Amino acid sequence: MVACLYYQAVGIAAGPAGATPRRADRRKARTRAALVRAAQGFLAEGRTGVSIRDITDAADVGFGTFYGHFETKEQLLEEAAGAALDGYAAMLATLTEGLTDPAEVFAVSFRMAGRLQRRHPELVRVILNSGTAILLSDSGMVRHARADIAAAQAAGRFDGDDPDIALMAAGGAMLGVMQMLDANPELDAGAVADQFAVRILRMLGISADEAAALCATAPPMVPELP
């Protein structure tokens, strides 16, 4: 399911504006997407020790095809984890359009990401089984979070002037939210995410009253994945 997001990420070469992608380009993109889809399935199961042969078998492509797209299994797994976030990050960005306060943008994004586990558990398990290294990735969600934090710091809404430090703190908290919800299916995902969001906002310099107010409004619905 989560790998549907990958088809845009692989970027089928279209050539000049308006040109139709060549059949070979489309075939190559489909093969790469199949490898990523298979890798995401293994990541969601926590099976990072699988072999390249396991992955190509799951993708239903030839073993030698793998090396036409990736140099190592680790490179594929890294791309699979990042790609699992990119499409959702794009959808999340549309939900915060029109918000002018960067602290509110961050709060909405954090609260929405915390609600992911109940709606898209496979995506969350890809994230969790990738570990904290995903916070150093160039995935869309990480880029957006860093940009939101930097904007809030520049506007004087958040304390500090190093968005990377704040990102590691907020990202570590988000992984904790996801792990807690994954392990405890009876917990209210919205309540847990909002409680964490209040604490992260306070850590970043927002007053207790304002942090509570920013997390008191009803957030948008978590969208379906394409």
Image (spheres, rainbow, N blue to C red):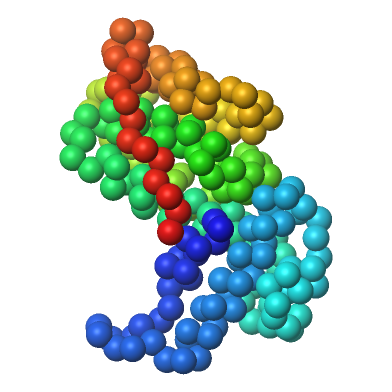
Using the image, determine if residue 26 lies above or below residue 89. Answer: below
Residue 86 placed where, x, y %?
Answer: 45, 54
- Determine if residue 25 is in view: yes
Quadrant in which the C terminus appears: bottom left
Q: Quadrant of residue 146?
A: top left
Residue 9 placed where, x, y %?
Answer: 45, 65
Residue 62 placed where, x, y %?
Answer: 73, 83
Front residue of 32 and 60: 60
Using the image, determine if residue 145 lies above or below residue 89. Answer: above
Quadrant in which the N terminus appears: bottom right
Using the image, determine if residue 141 lies above or below residue 19. Answer: above
Using the image, determine if residue 148 lies above or below residue 75. Answer: above
Residue furthest bottom as drawn? 23
- Determine if residue 164 is in view: no
79 on left or right of 202: right
Q: Image point 74% across, 48% down: which residue? A: 46
168 on left or right of 14: right
Q: Image point 73% across, 50% down: which residue? A: 45
Q: Image point 80% across, 60% down: which residue? A: 50
Q: Quadrant of residue 147?
A: top left
Q: Image point 59% across, 78% down: which residue? A: 31
Residue 205 placed where, x, y %?
Answer: 36, 16
